[in-house]
Image (cartoon, rainbow, N blue to C red):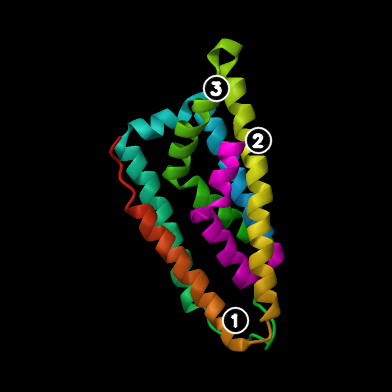
Amino acid sequence: MGAALVLLLVPGPAVLYITARSASQGRLAGLVSVLAIETANFLQAVAAALGLSAILLSSALAFDVVKYLGAAYLIYLGIRKLLASDNGEVEGTIRRESLARIYWQGFAVNILNPKTALFFFAFLPQFVDPAKGNVIGQNLLLGAVFVGMAIVTDSLYSLLASSLAGTLAGNKGFQKGGRYFAGLVYIGLGITTALTGSRK
């Protein structure tokens, strides 16, 4: 838990995505994004515990396919956000996407990030004690603990970002800037994902 807390408090790609979504779409959208990201994290943790991640990480082709799909999707979201029109927006309000769309976008972003699979594959086994038996069960428990802690820390980042954005919600320039910020964050994360090496 101590090691997980240190990692979670340092803002990473997931936090950047969540804060960008929270700043541009509001508190509820940010919290839904947290739920989406952590759902994908838990599935990645389960895959690591069952050894399924090893299949992805042992194949350069599979790794690259997932990597480029995730990168392309992030860049698509960023370009879509940058090209969004201001027409029809009422001053002081935010044009909101449906919560279902926000959830599935966040889920897709994280499930298509091979670095997440690599993280759980490398991180969790360090805290497993084979002498205590049921290695898969230990991995699943550690994954659940990590995801539970991540929900708390990521939600705090989301609430902070949405609160700061809320104080400036009436500023039309800030609304446009928030949209550009979110779009550039998505594109930046996409490029970073694309540049992730596939070598073991």
Name the one closer to the observer, 128 or 35: 128
Residue bearing the label numbered 2: 145
Foreground mark, 2 or 1, reads 2
- Tell me residue 90's x, y (percent): 68, 87
152 in magenta: no
Name the one closer to the observer, 129 or 166: 129
Main SS type for the magenta part? Answer: helix
Could you tell me the amino acid type at mark 1?
A: Gln
- Tell me residue 200's x, y (percent): 30, 34
Category of crowding for the residue at label 3, using alpha-carbon neighbours closer than 10 angstroms: few (below 14), some (14–19), many (at least 20): some
Taking the image as shown, residue 76 lies to the left or right of residue 6, namely left
Residue at mark 2 to residue at mark 3: CA–CA distance: 13 Å
Label of residue 128 in the image? 3
- Stretch in magenta: 1-29
Look at the picture and state if 167 lies above or below 135: below
Name the one closer to the observer, 116 or 4: 4
Residue at 57% in and 42% down: 41
Residue bearing the label numbered 1: 175
**Label located before the other in sequence (3 or 1):** 3
Could you tell me the amino acid type at mark 3?
A: Val
Residue at mark 2 to residue at mark 1: CA–CA distance: 36 Å
Category of crowding for the residue at label 1, using alpha-carbon neighbours closer than 10 angstroms: few (below 14), some (14–19), many (at least 20): many
Q: Is residue 87 among what the camera can see?
A: no
- Tell me residue 132's x, y (percent): 60, 13
Residue at 50% in and 30% down: 48
